[in-house]
Amino acid sequence: MHKRIVTDLFSWLHNHSYFVSTNTTSVVQDYCNRSNVYFVVNRINLTNRYTTETEINQAINELQKGIATPLQITFQPGTLFYPLQLTSINQGNTKINVYVITDYYVQDGSNILLIEDVETSYFGKEYGEHITWLTFDGPTSELTKDSFFHKKTVSP
């Protein structure tokens, strides 16, 4: 049954003009075999915000350099995690920044994401009192498992 899910997912993406390489099948299949997994797909439409060709070209240039307005996707998983393995489908090097806002500082159980910095949250108690900034900078081939976060036991 799970094989059908990944086939349906790829068909939906293709029918909505998203390119997905068949080289990604095994990684995506692994996620489809898990319970409670969701995929988020987004498309950037620059004409929603920019009207002139110059503005659009500048925005495209910034996106190609990695400058973008971050997306905030909010959900409540049983365990805090970041799907690093999914990022491994891209070849080459990548830089990843993950900000975890909780009531405590976190560390990555996979030891792939390293703590860059920690600070007190300026969001207040509504979102959590602590921000942990974790990073990865290197080849995507090293992203062999997901990051699962747990409470940092040693003070920052």
Image: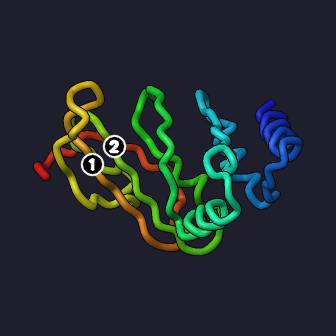
Image-quadrant location for residue 89: bottom right
92, 124: nearer the viewer: 124
**Residue type indicated by callout 2:** Val
In the image: residue 96, left or right of residue 44: left
Q: Is residue 79 above or below residue 106?
A: above
**In the image, what residue occupies the spot 50% across and 36% down?**
73
Amino acid at dot 1: Thr
Q: Residue at x 51, y 43 (%)?
A: 71
Q: Are marks 1 and 2 in contact (CB under 8 Å)?
A: yes
CA gap, disc 1 and disc 2: 5 Å
Q: Residue at x 40, y 60 (%)?
A: 112
Q: Nearer the viewer, residue 127 or 80?
A: 127
Of the image marks 1 and 2, the number of the one nearer the N terminus: 2
- Seen as rendered, the residue at the extreme left is 155
Asked whether residue 27 is in view, the answer is: yes
- Residue at 25%, 35% (x, y): give it: 123
The picture quadrant where one finds residue 31 is top right
Residue 122 point in image, percent of width and height: 21, 39
Find disc 2 in the rendering and name its residue. Answer: 100
Q: Give the structural element (helix, strand or loop) at label 1.
A: strand
Q: Which mark is residue 132?
A: 1
Left or right of 28 in this view: 138: left
